[in-house]
Image (cartoon, grey):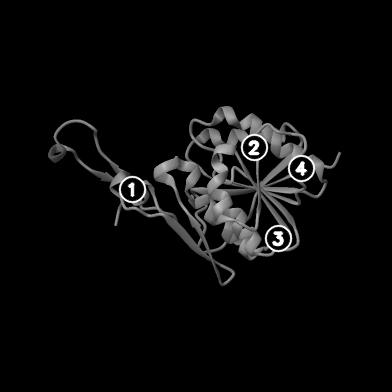
Amino acid sequence: MIDPLLLDTSLFGDDAKVERKASPPRRSWTPGFREQVDGGVRSFRLAIAEKEVAVALEYRANGTSSSVWDAGVVLAKFLEREPPAGLDVVELGCGTGFVGLCAETLGARRVTLTDLPSCLALAKRNCPRCHVMPLPWGTTENLPRADLVLCADCLLPGGLHLFEPLRDTVVAFLRQHPKCVALVAFEERMPGAWHFFDLLRHQGVTCGHLPHHRLHPAFSDPHRIHVLRCAALIE
């Protein structure tokens, strides 16, 4: 069934005279705006390595930072295929903490969830075994140790001004530990999203798509959602 939000219609005039043109259906694994705000959906659950990972959602109260988005699911199911067992993991812009909680479920040694201070209460409730701390983008000092940095659905329309601060923090993590890798997953909602990776490359960071065969076959959408592996060049 096609989501009515995907119909190309005019906001004005007689609906009966508007020709509705349906966009191609797309995959979606997470509850949308209508389901959460109008339908009262308050949680999200996903099977990870034969365990159920569940988080509370608060979209109605706190907006996009309190929901789970499809790029986070794609990244979590990739981690299921290549578990971060024994690694120190940091999630940037964690929101609900879902991706970090999946990493913890998959055997990460220590998971640190980071976001703006106003966004951390929900992550603390969802992920009691993870360390939760404020970390505004642009921070480059006193960072927690990380072998793996996760960033899911942080490249958003209207957020171009945040790309350079986020770049600075990612680069600082990669330079702090020579073997540290960042995985950045995002839904391509705007062409300008790719500029973020140009900013990283200008700082000597290599950025490359994860091959599609490494992603979970049932949880991938290569035309819409991308996962890039970012690592610092050896100087």
In percent of width and height, residue 15 lies at 16, 38
Q: Which residue is mark 3?
A: 108
Q: Give 37 or 219, whichever is nearer the viewer.
A: 37
Amino acid at dot 3: Ala
Give the CA separation, mark 2 to mark 3. Answer: 26 Å
Secondary structure at numbered mark 4 = helix
- Determine whether, in the image, residue 87 is placed left or right of residue 91: right
- Tag in front: 1 or 4: 1
Q: Give 192 or 4, whichever is nearer the viewer.
A: 4
- Tag in front: 1 or 2: 1
User: Tags 3 and 1 in contact by the CB under 8 Å rule?
Assistant: no
Q: Earlier in the sequence, mark 1 or mark 4?
A: 1
Give the residue at x 64% y 34%.
Answer: 137
- Tag in front: 4 or 3: 3
Q: Count the marks.
A: 4
Give neighbour class at mark 1: few <14, some 14-19, many 20+ (Cα, 10 Å): few
Examine the rendered structure and indicate whether residue 136 appears above or below residue 186: above
Instruction: Say the numbered circle drawn on residue 34.
Output: 1
Amino acid at dot 4: Leu
Instruction: Say the numbered circle drawn on residue 174.
Output: 4
Give the residue at x 62% y 35%.
Answer: 196
In percent of width and height, residue 120 lies at 57, 44
User: Tags 1 and 4 in contact by the CB under 8 Å rule?
Assistant: no
Q: Which residue is mark 2?
A: 197
- Tag in front: 2 or 4: 4
Secondary structure at numbered mark 1 = helix
Q: Earlier in the sequence, mark 3 or mark 1?
A: 1
Give the CA separation, mark 1 to mark 2. Answer: 32 Å
The quarter of the picture where the N terminus appears is bottom left
